[in-house]
Image (cartoon, rainbow, N blue to C red):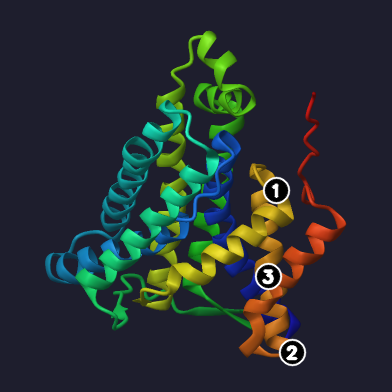
Amino acid sequence: MFIQQLINGIFIGVTYALVTIGFNMVYGVLKLTNFAHASFYMLAAYIAQYIGANFLLTSGVSWWVVLLISVSITAILGAGMDLLALRPIRKKHGAPIIALISTIGVQTMINNGVLLVFGTVPLMMPDPFNFGSVQISGAVVQGMQIFITTLAILLLIVLSIIVYKTKFGTAMRAVSQNPTAASLMGINVPKIISLTFFVGIAAAGIAGVLMGTYYQRVDSLMGASVGLKCFAAAVLGGIGSVPGAALGGLLIGIAETLFAGYVSSGYRDVVAFVILIFILLVRPQGLLGKKEIKKV
């Protein structure tokens, strides 16, 4: 029983981590809580479902092509959100609350747009793999779980390399520290911010497509709970920290799965918020976060 719940928790946790890393990347650069982040997670799943249902089953299009197209469209829309909704606010030196409200507006537009186009009835997502299942120490593990977990871990490693080992990552961290100084050093700050949105929302989109494929369905509420849990995971691991996002997502996934298995599945969503309140009281900067020292 414990092994089974632990495996399920790791599987859920790595997908939370993938969404949370994208959230943390945007927050790290702009200090902005992007409320539309989880809506892009849902949107990517709906786009993949539409392509899969209409072309994957009828024309033999590869699932990888479906993943690439749906995530690319979602990431471009995410970068477009920064270009059209947030960059003008930054140019006019608008208050941070204005940008925050703008992300809520984008979230509302995406959610209502999905309802308008696809309706309120959950849609079936085709599963092109049919991996079957295996037994590990008496626990039944779906082949799709192994596939998604492996792919998510590889993506987490790639994202960490991008942030810490590439010129783009160096520029992103420079913009995070001091946008003015980064601009004086020749960094195209607006471009770096838009690329950060592109990469961060692409990560959320990949997670959305993976989970839609695993559950073989998508619905308009799939992003709501994930968004709140990933916010809790970001705070738990250290908001703005990429390793913290991975750790926070994993811990939230394991904690809620164990709670569902041993206490009550009906209240599993409560776990993330109990952990959030506890970590804010005990260690507000998160497990891997650092205290900000403000000079006056």
Q: Quadrant of the C terminus?
A: top right
Residue located 69% across and 87% down the image: 261
Q: Quadrant of the N terminus?
A: bottom right
Give the residue pinned by disc 3.
272
Going from the N terminus, do you reach mark 2 or mark 3 first? Answer: 2
Q: Is residue 180 left or right of residue 219?
A: right
Amino acid at circle 1: Gly
Q: Residues within 10 Å of mark 2 (few under 14, many from 20)?
A: few
Residue located 65% across and 72% down the image: 9
Position of residue 295 measured from the top left corner of the image (x, y, whole percent): 79, 24
Judge whether 187 appears above or below 77 on screen.
above
* Mark 2 to mark 3 CA distance (whole Å): 15 Å
Q: Quadrant of residue 294?
A: top right
Q: Residue 257 shows which numbered tag?
A: none
Q: Residues within 10 Å of mark 3 (few under 14, many from 20)?
A: many
Q: Nearer the viewer, residue 213 or 72?
A: 72
Judge whether 236 appears above or below 82 on screen.
below
* Mark 1 to mark 2 CA distance (whole Å): 27 Å
Q: Nearer the viewer, residue 235 or 148?
A: 235
Q: Quadrant of residue 171?
A: top right
Amino acid at circle 3: Ala
Give the residue pinned by disc 2.
263
Q: Is residue 15 left or right of residue 198?
A: right
* Mark 1 to mark 3 CA distance (whole Å): 15 Å
Going from the N terminus, do you reach mark 1 or mark 3 first? Answer: 1
Please tell me whether mark 1 or mark 3 is closer to you in this view.
3
Judge whether 244 appears above or below 213 on screen.
above
Residue located 53% across and 63% down the image: 227
- Numbered disc 1: secondary structure: helix
Give the residue pinned by disc 1.
244
Q: Nearer the viewer, residue 96 or 246?
A: 96
